[in-house]
Amino acid sequence: MNTVAYEEELERSGTILFTVKGVSMRPLFRTATDAILVVKCALEDLKNLDIVLFMRPGPNGVEYVLHRIVDRTSDGKYIIAGDNCIGVDIVDPSDILGVVKSAKRGNKDIPLTGFKYSIYKNLWCRPYKFRSFCLRTKARIKGIGRRIIKGRK
């Protein structure tokens, strides 16, 4: 089987289509069911809250990650986080491969524009530090609940 890296395919055709793996972009994207179309883009066109595909080093080589731009550093790097993540990645612009153009769940489009999406982006994604606090608090409450239930047995 001949495999082509995402960056090679983006360079060749300008687009890639793949299925989401993982839970870092929930509730927007679901693993193994959502198809994402990523297009090559100019770095100057990227803006806050865009969902981008980027590369980062992983334990077995390069990892491809689909997360959202939440801020920029003073030296021009991007602060990127998954919608369901506590931590962030500081990403060099050269590691960003493309931006999400569209998404589908089965035969239905996942709306990436419009009023509902705008509310989601601005209330959940934009305040990423508050979101991180909420997710940490939720994890702590779950952990306490598990310990209480475990203690009853």
Image (cartoon, grey):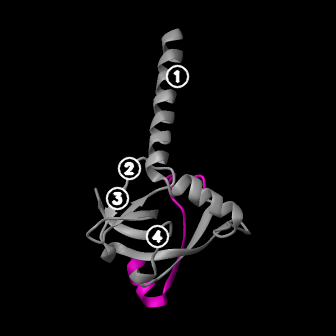
Callout 3 secondary element: strand
C-alpha distance separating marks 2 and 1: 23 Å
Point out the residue furthest to the right here. 107
Residue 21 image offset from top left, x and y in percent = 51, 58
Q: Quadrant of the N terminus?
A: bottom left
Callout 1 secondary element: helix
Q: Residues within 10 Å of mark 3 (few under 14, many from 20)?
A: some
Residue 31 can be seen, yes or no:
no
Q: Which label is found at residue 52?
A: 4
Was residue 47 drawn as part of the magenta stretch in this picture? Answer: no
Q: Measuring 44% from the left and 89% from the top, which residue is drawn there?
A: 12
Magenta span covers which residues?
1-28
Residue 23 can be seen, yes or no:
yes
Q: Are marks 2 and 3 in contact (CB under 8 Å)?
A: yes
Residue 75 image offset from top left, x and y in percent = 26, 70
Callout 2 secondary element: loop
Residue 126 image offset from top left, x and y in percent = 51, 58
Q: Are marks 2 and 4 in contact (CB under 8 Å)?
A: no
**Residue placed under numbered mark 3 in the picture:** 89
Q: Which label is found at residue 118?
A: none
Of the pair 141 and 20, the residue shown nearer to us? 141
**Residue placed under numbered mark 2 in the picture:** 87
Q: Are marks 2 and 1 in contact (CB under 8 Å)?
A: no
Task: In the rendered view, tell whether residue 147 sits above or below residue 28.
Answer: above
C-alpha distance separating marks 2 and 3: 7 Å
**Of the residues shown, which amino acid type is indicated by label 1?**
Gly
C-alpha distance separating marks 2 and 4: 16 Å
